[in-house]
Every structure is written in C-alpha cells, then in structure tokens.
Amino acid sequence: MIERYTLPEMGNLWTESYKLKTWLQVEIAVCEAQAELGYIPAQAVEEIKAKANFDPKRVLEIEAEVRHDVIAFLTNVNEYVGDAGRYIHLGLTSSDVLDTALGLQLVASLDVISEHLENLIQAIRQKAREHRDTVMIGRSHGIHAEPMTFGFKLAGWLAEVLRHQQRLKVMRETIAVGKISGAVGTYANIEPRVEAIACQKLGLTPDTASTQVISRDRHADYVQQLALVAASIERFAVEIRNLQKTDVLEVEEFFAKGQKGSSAMPHKRNPIRSERLTGMARLVRSHAGAALENVALWHERDISHSSVERVILPDACILTHFMLVEITELVKNLLVYPENMARNLNCYGGVVFSQKVLLALIDKGLKREEAYGIVQESAHAAWNKPDGNFHHLITQDPRVTQKLSPAEIAQCFDPQQHLRHLDQVYQRLDI
C-alpha cells in the first residue's frame, strides 16, 4: 500500500514512479476483490502481491514499441509476476486503472494542500490577534475611507481561508471516487461487486454512473477549487504589495540580512514574494479554464482530456501547495508599522472622520443634503494640501459649532467610534 501521508513534498506525488505505484495498487485491489468473490485463486493473488513490481525505465522502453502506457505497464509487471500475472487486469479497461489511480493521486494531493491551508489559517489567526487593536485607515477605490484595524483586515482574510477549508472538505468527497466498470461503464465483463470491494480497499467510493471514464466535471471542480485558493492568495499578496508602497509603507515583507532589492538601487526592498504569488495565481486560474474544456468528451470517452491533465493537474496541485507555503511564511514574518498607519490615518487633519461629523449634524436637525455640503466643503478644502487640516476647518465653521460642542466634535474624531462593534467579528472567528 502507498504511504500517502509520509511523502515530504507535493512534487513526489506526481512522479512517474508514484503514478505507477497507484496503478499497481489499483490492479492489486481488483485482484483481491476478485479473489474474495471466488473468481480467481486466492493463492494467485498472494503470489501477485509478493512478486508484483515495475521499472519506470523498462515501462518506457516497452511503451516506445507498443504505443500504449497501460499495456506497457502490465507487460513489465508480468515480467516480475510470471504465470499468476494472467489474473491481473481481468475484465478491466485502461481507464479503470487510470481514473481510479488518478483519484488516489488527487486525494493525496488535496490532503497535502489541506494541511498547508490549516498552517495558513493558524498564521493569519495569530497575526490578527497581534494586531486586533492596531488602528489603520480602510480604503475604498484606493482612497482613504474610514478607520479600521489591521487585525480586522486579517479577519477578512481568515474568514475567506476558512471557507476554502470547508470547500476542500467537500471536494475531497467529490474527487475520492473510482471506477471498475469496463469499456463503456456497463460492467459487461466485471461485476459491480468487484468495483465496490476494490474501491473500499482503496479508500474511494464507486462513481455513481461512469462511462469509460469518470466524468470530468469532478476534475474541473477540483481545479476550480484550487484556482479559488490561488485567487485568495493573490488578493492577500496584492494587498501586501499596495501597503508596502513607499508612500504608504504600512506593512512590508521581511527583508533578510544580505538580501538585495535592486542591482542598480541599493535602497530598494521589493515585495518579491507577493509579486511571485500574483504571477502564480494567473497560472492556476488558467488551468481551471482548461479543466472546464475537458468536460465535453465524445460519447463515452475520447483521449483529448488526457494530454491536458498531464500538465494541468500536477501543475495546479504543485503550484497551489507552493503558494500556500509562501503566503504562510510571508504572513508569519510580515513587518507591520503601526506608526505609519497612524500617520496615514490622520493625514489632512483627519478628513476620514467626515461621515461622523455628517451624522452628528444630521442628528442635530440639519437636512442631510445641507449637512453633506457643509462637511464636504471643509473636507475638499483640506484634501491633498500640504497644510490641509479638516479638523481645524470644521472647528472654525460656525455652521458646525452652532450645532456641535467641542466635546461632540472631538468624539467625531475618535477612531474608537468606528471599532466598537468589531468584537463581534473577532468572536465569530475565534480571534
């Protein structure tokens, strides 16, 4: 049996050797099922299990001649097994082995991805706890909006990743299927009972109604779920890139001792990990499109999907795994600058508190349009000017001071007014 959970890297799950191991695992499971039902001698199965092996190089040599990968594999296995090998692959078609074994690979890959997704969840949760009360400016359209906390921003990331965790749990059930049903799925030369027993031994569920293959909507769903994970990682990476801009500099990727940012400019500290993740997300998303194209096969099966999957499935799994490792390390070691957050929050004299002033004036009896015009006038007078000071202009406007006391104005400029309900969000996420 293949030890899925001890493999150190995702790439090992997509080697030629590992693929052939899963093929052999499927063949042996079917032989065991046939023996349990009395169709082949139990002694022959024990001999097969004891002797069965393969040599990837030899398989390729045979394939070069026969032009069929499964036949080449079976020929090589029988070179090890001998006479008992006649009981291997009885009543099967190639796709019984290929698709069932692919299910094993995809489940093993998903388990690795899920493990690293959990690592990311813990990293985000910890960083969100650290910065639960770190006040910063929220942005809309890239423009300063209203106060929030960096912990709250991370809470949004955490909620998103937790949704992915739930999706992947469902996805595991969707993809953990096998089929041992013959050339067009009708069980013409093998019984459904063999499929049920073999799949149980493999930890899979028999496909509900296969053709010669397992329908590719399952595989398209799988790649789309990975594309969604990649899209979220890109969202986090783009946010870090924006917040690391020199004129913002609220967070920054960790910059190691001896690291260089530019061959020309010694001062540069570039967000290279975030940029790398952005590029990789484009690749994973592109694979989702190819996976969707694979759904529409001719009749009970053609081979147009096969060449595509040999590229997109290993790539999507390996890229997603790598992206999760990278973003987790990035979050863990992220440099956060609360002083710069405070500076940016209060630029132009706290113009971002305009809505609180607006609502206070409305509460005092002004019509909304009148109050809006008064506040906007001061806000625009302060906006983007070196000496712009919204707070000063508001406190000097008699239309405001006639309605609001100094204490009431001061309360409008208190960022805690914007944060008083955030505990509910943190409680939902156990931050």
Image (cartoon, rainbow, N blue to C red):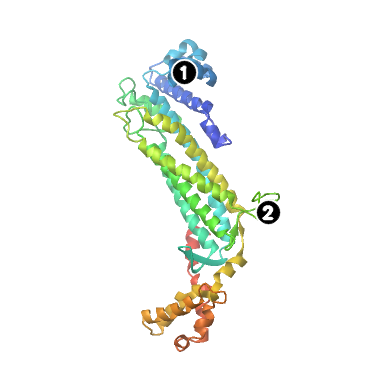
Residue 63, numbered circle? 1
Question: Element at badge 2?
Answer: loop
* Residue 35 screen position, x and y as percent: 41, 19
Q: Which residue is mark 2?
A: 266
On the question of residue 147 being in view, the answer is yes
- Residue 335's x, y, as percent? 62, 57
Residue type at the position of mark 1: Glu
**Is residue 357 shown left or right of residue 185?**
right
Q: x%, y% of residue 329?
A: 59, 49
On the image, which quarter does residue 288 sit in?
top left
**Relative to 405, does residue 312 appear above or below in the rendering?**
above
The reply to whether residue 171 is in sight is no
Please report the residue visible at 55 percent of the width from the left and 59 percent of the height from the top.
Answer: 243
Q: For residue 196, which quarter of the picture? A: top left
- Which residue is the extreme one toward the front? 264
388 or 328, which is in the foreground?
388
Residue 319 percent coordinates (x, y): 51, 41
Q: Which mark is residue 81?
A: none
Residue type, label 2: Pro
Q: Residue at x 55, y 66 (%)?
A: 136
Q: Are marks 1 and 2 in contact (CB under 8 Å)?
A: no
Say if 110 sits above or below 264 in the image. above
Q: Which residue is the extreme one toward the top?
A: 83
- Dot 1: few (<14), some (14–19), or many (≥20) neighbours within 10 Å? some
Mark 1 or 2, nearer chain start: 1
